Image (cartoon, helix red, strand yellow):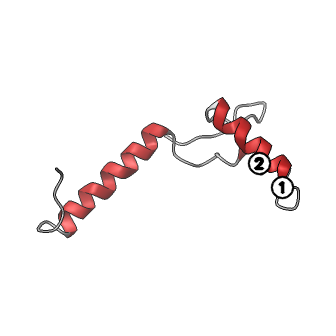
Amino acid sequence: LLFSVDPDLTPQDNDIIASGRLRACNANPERRDAVTCPIASTGHPTPRGAARYGQAVIKQLEIAMPNLYTIA
């Protein structure tokens, strides 16, 4: 449930997000790494992966703080 790159090295995240990141990469040449900046989503969770991370955190909070943490 992580983003990767396709065989042609294009990023797998949403086109809107990827195109915005590419514009940001190009607008900041001093911070631009021509290899990694355009594919910076690689290794980050997909929306489903982010939801799973969130569920895991909530579960641990419920265990660690049963009297303080409740889901409304």
Residue at image coords 16%, 68%:
68
Q: Which mark is residue 49?
A: none
Where in the figure is residue 26, as x and y percent of width and height?
85, 47
- Label 1's element? loop
Where in the figure is residue 1, as x and y percent of width and height?
49, 40
- The amino acid type, in three-letter code, at marker 1 is Asn
Tell me how far mark 2 sits from mark 1, CA to CA: 6 Å
Q: Which mark is residue 28?
A: 1
Tell me: residue 39, above or below residue 13.
below
Q: Which mark is residue 24?
A: 2
25 left or right of 52?
Answer: right
Would you say the residues marked 2 and 1 are in contact, meaning their CB atoms lie under 8 Å apart? Answer: yes
Is there any visible trace of residue 35 in the rendered image?
Answer: no
Answer few, some or many: residues within 10 Å of disc 1's Cα (few below 14, many 20 plus, some between 14 and 19): few
Q: Nearer the viewer, residue 22 or 59?
A: 22
61 left or right of 11?
Answer: left
Residue at image coords 77%, 36%:
9
Tell me: residue 8, above or below residue 56.
above
